[in-house]
Image (spheres, rainbow, N blue to C red):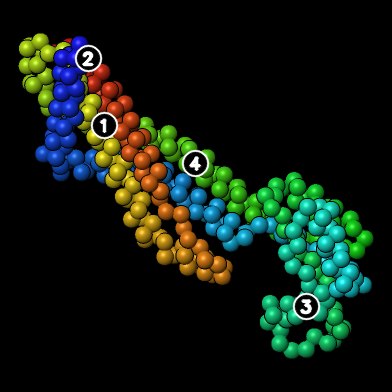
């Protein structure tokens, strides 16, 4: 039993190493094949990383919807602060900013660019303004809170900026679904690429295969080198894909960091993790094994022509 096990391990080790040696001897053609495999594996992984960084940027920059509550002109600054604390507790929302009438006018001057006097509009023409935000909001909860605030007798108008954020979340959900579809499509593409490559290798090795059959070699012995060759294609293709991802992020990290500075924040993009690299290598090897099995079953299952 031990002798048979030891012989089987030796045969597997030889097939494993010889398959890699054959790829090295045919390295020019192997590099071309590995490049195609790497692109097929990298595209959905790169899209997933892009989605993660967009979501990370949203959270780090504080891109959460706000309620802007314009109070009635008769409400004073002290009353505005009291109302802000009361509504914060009542509706489970966070106070983002409180602007009394004087501060609202100064804010309007700063953002509008009007340097001249606004005395013709009155002493304090703008009302007090309360700005609230909410953690982990949903569209329905934002709408309900907005309607509840609008019904308060001290409130003149309520404005929410949730529409653009809903669009952003819609884009992120679309990217996530698109990424899932691409994973399936490019997985099939990888299987077909590796399967076709192994099929060509089997065609080029027909003389050796026929010789082994005449010598009485079992089918498993004949199939084994091609299966390991497919795994090597997938494994090295996954490693190649991870290196491409790292190069992409080296190129993109500068613009992404500058984007964070435009919002006066320090944004550090999430780099492709070693775990993602391990997943690419594992998935690549598995897809390569599957592609090789398909090719071997089709090609070696054919009856030899005489």
In this rendering, the label closer to the viewer, 4 or 3: 3
| Numbered circle sitting on residue 301 | 2
Kindly identify the residue that appears in the image at 11 percent across and 39 percent down.
Answer: 25
- Considering every residue shown, the one lying at the far bottom of the view is 116
Q: Is residue 287 visible?
A: yes
In this rendering, the label closer to the viewer, 3 or 2: 3
Q: Position of residue 303 (x, y in %)?
A: 17, 11
**Which secondary structure, mark 1?**
helix
The residue that label 1 is drawn on is 231
- Considering every residue shown, the one lying at the far front of the view is 2
Kindly identify the residue that appears in the image at 38 percent across and 39 percent down.
Answer: 279
The residue that label 3 is drawn on is 103
Disc 3 residue crowd, few under 14, some 14–19, many 20+, Cα 10 Å: some
Q: Earlier in the sequence, mark 3 or mark 2?
A: 3
What is the quadrant of the C terminus in the image? top left
Kindly identify the residue that appears in the image at 25 percent across and 36 percent down.
Answer: 233
Q: Front-most of 8 and 120?
A: 8
Q: Earlier in the sequence, mark 1 or mark 2?
A: 1
Q: Position of residue 36 (x, y in %)?
A: 28, 42
Alpha carbons under labels 4 and 1: distance apart? 27 Å
The residue that label 4 is drawn on is 178
């Amino acid at each position: 039993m031990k002798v048979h096990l030891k012989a089987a391990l030796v045969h597997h080790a030889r097939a494993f190493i010889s398959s890699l040696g054959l790829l090295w001897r045919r390295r020019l053609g192997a590099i071309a094949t590995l490049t195609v495999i790497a692109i097929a594996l990298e595209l959905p992984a790169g899209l997933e990383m892009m989605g993660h960084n967009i979501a990370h940027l949203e959270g780090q920059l504080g891109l959460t919807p706000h309620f802007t509550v314009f109070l009635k002109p008769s409400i004073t600054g002290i009353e505005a602060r009291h109302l802000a604390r009361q509504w914060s507790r009542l509706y489970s929302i966070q106070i983002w900013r409180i602007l009394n009438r004087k501060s609202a006018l100064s804010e309007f001057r700063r953002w509008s660019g009007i340097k001249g006097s606004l005395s013709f509009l009155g002493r304090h023409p703008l009302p007090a303004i309360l700005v609230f935000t909410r953690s982990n909001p949903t569209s329905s909860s934002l709408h309900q809170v907005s309607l509840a605030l609008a019904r308060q007798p001290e409130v003149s108008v309520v404005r929410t900026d949730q529409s653009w954020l809903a669009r952003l979340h819609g884009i992120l959900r679309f990217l996530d679904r698109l990424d899932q579809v691409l994973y399936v499509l490019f997985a099939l593409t990888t299987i077909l690429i590796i399967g076709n490559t192994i099929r060509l290798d089997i065609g080029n090795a027909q003389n050796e295969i026929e010789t082994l059959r005449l010598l009485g070699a079992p089918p498993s012995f004949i199939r084994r080198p091609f299966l390991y060759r497919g795994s090597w294609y997938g494994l090295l293709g996954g490693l190649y894909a991870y290196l491409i991802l790292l190069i992409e992020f080296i190129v993109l990290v500068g613009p992404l960091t500058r984007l964070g500075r435009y919002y006066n924040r320090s944004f550090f993009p999430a780099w492709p993790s070693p775990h993602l690299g391990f997943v690419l290598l594992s998935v690549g090897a598995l897809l390569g094994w599957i592609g090789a099995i398909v090719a071997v079953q089709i090609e070696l299952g054919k009856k030899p022509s005489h």
